[in-house]
Amino acid sequence: MVPRLQTTEDYDALVPPVLPFLLNPPPPLSLVIVAKNEAHNLARCLASAEGCVQEMVVVLNDTTDGSEEVAQKAGARVYHLPWQGYRDTKNAALALASFDWVLSLDADEELSPDLRETLSHFLANDPNRFSGARFPRKAWFMNRWITHGDWYPDYGLRLFRRSSAKWGGDQFVHEKIDCDGPVATLRGDLHHYSSPTMASHVGKIVHFAELFWRQQQARGTSFSLRAALLRPPWRFFRGYVIKRGFLDGYPGFYLAVANAFATFVRYSRLYEERTPSTALIRDK
C-alpha cells in the first residue's frame, strides 16, 4: 500500500532523490575506469562522478580483491579483460562505452566539486565546438595538496569524443589521448591519491624503471652516461626552482629529490641490462 503524504515535509522526504535527476539528468557521458585491485580507491572515484555521467564502466584485470563488488554497488557495469599494456587495455575499455563522450579516470582519482560543475557546464553548452577537454590534476601527498613543481598542474586530456580520439603514445608507459580536433581547457582540479605514503611512492620508482627499460629496449635505445649524469640534476632544478616546488615546503623538496633519483634509476637500469653478469643472474 502506498503511504499517504500528509505534509510538505513528507513530500520532500520522498522527492529529493528522484526529482533532481528528472529535472537535470546527467549528460550522455560514459565514465570508463581500468583498474586492478583498487577496491580501497574505487568507491571514492565512482561516488565523485555520480550524477555527472549516465553510465559507469569499470574494466578489471587480474583482480583478486573486492573491486567488482564495489563497482556493482555503485551501479557500474563491470568487465574483466586481460592486461595488454596501458594503451591497448584502455582502448579496449573505450569500446565498451555506450556514449560518444567519455570521461576516462583512474581508480585513485576523484572529481573535485569545481571540476564536476565545470564538466556539466561544458557538456551542456560547448560539446559541439570541441573534440575533447583537459583539466589540471592535483595530488595529495604527505598530508597536503601539492600545488607546484613537476606534479602540478599536470594537465591531462581525460574528456573526449570516442569518434575523434583514442589512447596513443607508448605501449608500456606514458600513454596519452590522441585527439583529432580542438581541445578545451577547463578549470577545476582532478584530485589524485596515487601515493598515500612514502613507501608506496618509493615502490613505484622501481616499477616505472622497469617500464622505462622496456620502452627504451623497444626503441633500440642504449645506455647513455651523459643522460644518467645530466638528467637527474636537471629534473631537480626544473621541479624545485623553475616550477617553484619550494613553495610546497618539505614535501616539495622531497619530490624534487625523489624525481631526480627516479630519473637516475631509470637510466641506470639501461646500464644494468647491458652488463653480462646481470644476464647470468637473471638466467638462474
Image (tube, helix red, strand yellow):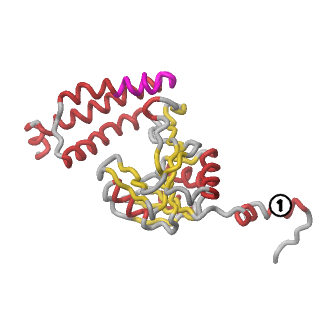
Residue 209 covered by magenta stretch: no
Residue in view at x 58 percent, y 65 percent:
28
Task: Tell which residue pokes out farthest to the bottom in this image.
Answer: 1
Q: Is residue 128 left or right of residue 14?
A: left
Q: Is residue 81 left or right of residue 154?
A: left
Q: Is residue 108 left or right of residue 27?
A: left
The residue where tag 1 is placed is: 12
Q: Magenta residues?
A: 235-250
- Residue 86 place in picture, x, y as percent: 35, 53
Q: Nearer the viewer, residue 172 or 280?
A: 172
20 up-or-down from 158: above or below: below
- The quarter of the displayed image where residue 213 is located: top left
* Residue 265 visible at all: yes
Residue in view at x 51 percent, y 51 percent:
133
53 up-or-down from 275: above or below: below
* Residue 50 visible at all: no
Residue 247 covered by magenta stretch: yes
* Residue type at numbered disc 1: Asp
Q: Nearer the viewer, residue 130 or 38?
A: 130
Determine the main secondary structure of the stretch shown in magenta: helix
- The quarter of the displayed image where residue 264 is located: top left
- Residue 81 place in picture, x, y as percent: 37, 64
Residue in view at x 32 percent, y 25 percent:
234
SS at circle 1: helix
For the N terminus, the quadrant is bottom right
Q: Residues within 10 Å of mark 1 (few under 14, many from 20)?
A: few
